[in-house]
Image: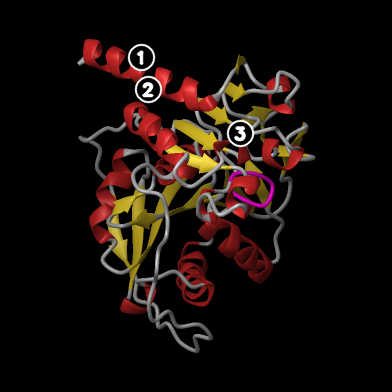
């Protein structure tokens, strides 16, 4: 049985986020023989429509307005509800991002349906779409299926592989005009204080530091290794509380959840709150002077040593390998 599925794409700083393509792949799994429709909301987002189609969307609908230049739940919910009312889908997929986590429950409440949040995998069992999501801070997983009404889910970034890009693929692109009214929130200015380079939540490689980094200057070693590996820098809450770095880098139960291919934890003890944000990484390397540190219990590889000695050595060796490859 086929479904019509709406997939919300996200653009940031003039580019589509990778989770948009992952959401399209998830949408196609839910749609089956049906139709997967990309939805782009913002100011001047129509330029991204073809890229969504190349990654699997059958067609794309855009809603453009100057009042949608910056995300607010009021404005975006009005725009998305207009598309939803017009298309009457059987499925909806958002990325489990800051935007998706804020907007999805509001939309679900408006249309009176349940929400499968933070899915890491989608399977088909006995003709039903089954979502797998972590519970108890990642200690266990549950399977959920929606047997009645609209199938609505958010997917965790970097878990569902996007389809291969097909630049020859084509599809219909249309736009609708939505009057954005009665806004309770108007954004006058956006001040960003985030790490440079790769988006932490979508990075394939993450170098994270804890209290063991000892200072703001200590994070320079992490930045150097991240630059060589093309990764992003993260931190434990302890490092953020100690003012070694900004809270935008925090990974854990009260921070970002990441699932990179490689996670290097330097000077992180491994508190359960931090493990909740990174324990599903594919390969975990821990660097700590304490051989009894809890982080070693989840690590695939452990280095017992001083991070101020180990990180420069790793950076040097990876630079040599990069030189050979290039």
Image mark for residue 315: 2
Q: Is residue 168 left or right of residue 163?
A: left
Image mark for residue 24: none
| Secondary-structure class at tag 2 | helix
- Tell me where residue 192 sits by quadrant: bottom left
User: 237 or 163, which is in the foreground?
Assistant: 237
Other-residue count near label 3 (Cα within 10 Å), few / some / many at <14 / 14–19 / ≥20? many
Residue 125: x %, y % from top left: 69, 27
Q: Which residue is drawn at 31% across and 57% down?
A: 13
Other-residue count near label 1 (Cα within 10 Å), few / some / many at <14 / 14–19 / ≥20? few
Q: Mark 3 points at which residue?
A: 122
Of the image marks 3 and 2, the number of the one nearer the N terminus = 3
Residue 153: x %, y % from top left: 61, 49
Q: Residue at x 49, y 85 (%)?
A: 183
Looking at the image, do the residues carrying marks 2 and 1 touch, with CB atoms under 8 Å apart?
Answer: yes
Quarter of the picture containing the N terminus is top right
Q: Name the residue under label 1.
A: 317
Q: What stretch is highlighted in magenta?
A: 251-256
Q: Give the CA separation, mark 3 to mark 2.
A: 37 Å
| Secondary-structure class at tag 1 | helix
> By what rule are the colours in the image chosen?
secondary structure
Image: 271 above or below 228: below
Q: Is residue 258 left or right of residue 36?
A: right
Residue 243 visible at all: yes
């Amino acid at each position: 049985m086929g479904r019509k599925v709406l997939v919300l794409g996200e653009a940031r700083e003039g580019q589509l986020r990778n989770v948009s393509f992952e959401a399209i792949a998830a949408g196609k799994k839910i749609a089956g023989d049906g139709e997967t429709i990309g939805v782009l909301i913002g100011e001047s987002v129509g330029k991204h429509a073809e890229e969504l189609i190349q990654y699997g969307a059958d067609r794309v609908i855009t809603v453009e307005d100057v009042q949608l230049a910056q995300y607010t739940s009021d404005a975006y919910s009005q725009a998305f509800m207009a598309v939803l009312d017009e298309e009457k889908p059987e499925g909806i997929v958002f990325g489990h991002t800051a935007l998706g986590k804020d907007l999805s429950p509001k939309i679900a409440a408006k249309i009176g349906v349940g929400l499968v949040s933070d899915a890491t995998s989608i399977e088909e069992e006995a003709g039903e779409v089954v979502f797998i999501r972590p519970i108890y801070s990642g200690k266990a997983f549950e399977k959920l299926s929606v047997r009645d009404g609209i199938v609505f889910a958010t997917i965790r970034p970097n878990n569902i592989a996007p389809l291969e890009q097909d630049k020859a693929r084509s599809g219909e692109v249309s736009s609708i005009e939505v009057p954005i009214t009665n806004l309770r929130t108007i954004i006058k200015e956006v001040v960003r204080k985030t790490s440079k380079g790769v988006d932490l939540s979508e990075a394939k490689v993450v170098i994270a530091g804890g209290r063991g980094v000892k200072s703001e200057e200590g994070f320079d070693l992490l930045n150097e290794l991240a630059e060589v590996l093309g990764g992003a820098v993260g931190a434990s809450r302890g490092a953020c509380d100690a003012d070694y770095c900004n809270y935008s880098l925090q990974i854990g139960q009260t921070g970002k959840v990441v699932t990179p291919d490689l996670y290097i934890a330097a000077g992180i003890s491994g508190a359960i709150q931090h493990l909740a944000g990174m324990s599903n990484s594919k390969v975990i390397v821990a660097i700590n002077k304490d051989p009894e540190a809890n982080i070693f219990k989840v690590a695939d590889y452990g280095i017992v040593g001083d991070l101020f000695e180990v990180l420069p050595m790793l950076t040097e060796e990876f630079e040599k390998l990069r030189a050979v490859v290039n």
